[in-house]
Image (cartoon, helix red, strand yellow):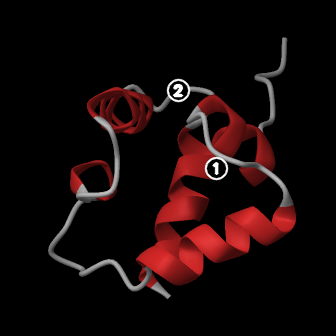
Amino acid sequence: MESPVHDLSALFKQLGLAADQASIERFIGLHAPLPQSCQLADAPFWSPAQASFLREEILEDADWAEVVDQLDVLLRG
Protein backbone atom coordinates (compact mmCIF):
# COMPACT_ATOMS: atom_id res chain seq x y z
CA MET A 1 0.00 0.00 0.00
CA GLU A 2 1.42 3.38 -0.97
CA SER A 3 1.52 6.31 1.40
CA PRO A 4 -0.77 9.20 0.56
CA VAL A 5 0.91 12.01 -1.32
CA HIS A 6 0.14 15.48 -0.06
CA ASP A 7 0.81 18.75 -1.82
CA LEU A 8 1.48 22.23 -0.51
CA SER A 9 -2.16 23.25 -0.86
CA ALA A 10 -3.28 20.26 1.21
CA LEU A 11 -0.71 21.12 3.88
CA PHE A 12 -1.98 24.68 4.12
CA LYS A 13 -5.54 23.36 4.48
CA GLN A 14 -4.34 20.94 7.18
CA LEU A 15 -2.78 23.90 9.01
CA GLY A 16 -6.03 25.88 8.75
CA LEU A 17 -4.56 28.41 6.33
CA ALA A 18 -5.84 29.73 3.01
CA ALA A 19 -4.64 27.18 0.46
CA ASP A 20 -4.94 28.83 -2.94
CA GLN A 21 -1.72 29.57 -4.84
CA ALA A 22 -1.86 33.34 -4.23
CA SER A 23 -2.35 32.86 -0.48
CA ILE A 24 0.51 30.36 -0.27
CA GLU A 25 2.81 32.75 -2.13
CA ARG A 26 1.70 35.63 0.12
CA PHE A 27 2.37 33.56 3.26
CA ILE A 28 5.84 32.59 2.07
CA GLY A 29 6.60 36.18 1.03
CA LEU A 30 5.51 37.44 4.43
CA HIS A 31 7.47 34.92 6.51
CA ALA A 32 10.58 34.18 4.42
CA PRO A 33 13.44 34.03 4.90
CA LEU A 34 13.33 31.90 8.01
CA PRO A 35 16.71 32.01 9.79
CA GLN A 36 18.77 28.83 9.40
CA SER A 37 19.06 28.63 13.20
CA CYS A 38 15.26 28.34 13.57
CA GLN A 39 13.52 24.99 13.16
CA LEU A 40 10.39 25.29 11.02
CA ALA A 41 8.07 24.26 13.87
CA ASP A 42 9.69 26.84 16.18
CA ALA A 43 8.93 29.80 13.90
CA PRO A 44 6.98 32.46 15.79
CA PHE A 45 4.11 32.67 13.30
CA TRP A 46 2.67 29.19 14.02
CA SER A 47 -0.06 28.57 16.57
CA PRO A 48 0.79 25.91 19.17
CA ALA A 49 -1.36 23.36 17.31
CA GLN A 50 0.28 24.12 13.96
CA ALA A 51 3.77 23.91 15.48
CA SER A 52 2.93 20.61 17.16
CA PHE A 53 1.62 19.14 13.91
CA LEU A 54 4.71 20.22 11.94
CA ARG A 55 7.07 18.91 14.62
CA GLU A 56 5.32 15.55 14.91
CA GLU A 57 5.19 14.96 11.16
CA ILE A 58 8.93 15.52 10.80
CA LEU A 59 9.88 13.53 13.91
CA GLU A 60 7.75 10.58 12.88
CA ASP A 61 8.69 10.86 9.18
CA ALA A 62 4.95 10.67 8.62
CA ASP A 63 2.83 11.09 5.48
CA TRP A 64 3.14 14.86 5.60
CA ALA A 65 6.92 14.97 6.16
CA GLU A 66 7.87 15.45 2.51
CA VAL A 67 5.59 18.44 1.95
CA VAL A 68 6.55 19.90 5.36
CA ASP A 69 10.17 19.73 4.17
CA GLN A 70 9.11 21.45 0.95
CA LEU A 71 7.54 24.29 2.94
CA ASP A 72 10.71 24.54 5.04
CA VAL A 73 12.81 24.97 1.89
CA LEU A 74 10.45 27.61 0.50
CA LEU A 75 10.54 29.60 3.74
CA ARG A 76 14.34 29.58 3.78
CA GLY A 77 14.60 30.89 0.22
Mark 1: amino acid: Val
Q: Is residue 65 above or below residue 38?
A: above
Q: Quadrant of residue 64?
A: top right
Mark 2: amino acid: Ala
**Residue name at image x 30 percent, y 48 percent:** 41
Q: Indicate which disc, 2 or 1, sits on the residue closer to the N terminus.
A: 2
Q: Which mark is residue 8?
A: none
Q: Nearer the viewer, residue 38 or 16?
A: 16
**Residue name at image x 46 percent, y 32 percent:** 61
Label 2 environment density (alpha carbons within 10 Å; few <14, some 14–19, many ≥20): few
The reply, left or right, for residue 16 in relation to residue 52 is right
Q: Is residue 74 above or below residue 45?
A: below
Q: Nearer the viewer, residue 15 or 66?
A: 15
Instruction: Give the labeled residue for mark 1.
Output: 67
Residue 62 in the image, given as x and y percentages of width and height? 53, 26
| Secondary element type, mark 1 | helix
Quadrant showing the N terminus: top right
Q: Quadrant of residue 60?
A: top left
Instruction: Give the labeled residue for mark 2.
Output: 62
Residue 3 in the image, given as x and y percentages of width and height? 76, 23
**Residue name at image x 73 percent, y 52 percent:** 8
Q: Nearer the viewer, residue 27 or 63?
A: 27
Residue 5 in the image, given as x and y percentages of width and height? 81, 35
